[in-house]
Amino acid sequence: MFAQSALRSSRALPSRIITRRNFQVSSKRLEDINTLVYGHPQEGVYSNLPFKIKNRKFIPFAVYYWGILGFFFAFPFLTSWWQLKKSGAFNQTEE
């Protein structure tokens, strides 16, 4: 008797099915909110990159690319030179 009442209460009633959260609907609502806040994502070539390649107004992409590449290559050499200069390793001693 107790088992049947427990089974009856655990069965899903139609009212519980309707009021339960529907994840498909909530994801669509979230998608609508994202398009309102962030706009529609662009599609096409180079649209997934975090920087602009085509139609740049100020610095061409090649200059930007090689400039950053050169800076990060030279950075350890520049910092080691600066530390040696501060320690006095480049001072010439008179003998």
Image (spheres, grey):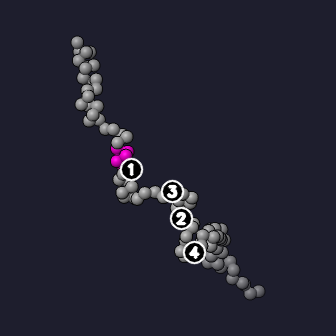
Counting residues from the N terminus, which is met first, the one under dot 2 or under dot 4? 2
- Residue that numbered label 4 is attached to: 59
Give the overall secondary structure of the magenta segment.
helix
Disc 3 residue type (three-letter): Glu
Magenta stretch: residue 90 in it? no
Q: Secondary structure at mark 1?
A: helix
Q: Secondary structure at mark 2?
A: loop
Badge 4 density bin: few <14, some 14–19, many ≥20, Cα 10 Å: few
- Residue that numbered label 2 is attached to: 51
Counting residues from the N terminus, which is met first, the one under dot 1 or under dot 4? 1
Let me know if residue 89 appears in the view. Answer: yes
Counting residues from the N terminus, which is met first, the one under dot 1 or under dot 3? 1
Badge nearest the viewer, 4 or 3: 3
Residue 38: percent from the left, percent from the top? 40, 59
Residues under numbered marks 4 and 3 in contact, where contact means CB atoms less than 8 Å apart: no
Disc 1 residue type (three-letter): Glu
Q: Secondary structure at mark 4?
A: loop
Front-most of residues 14 and 78? 14
Badge 1 density bin: few <14, some 14–19, many ≥20, Cα 10 Å: few
Badge nearest the viewer, 1 or 3: 3
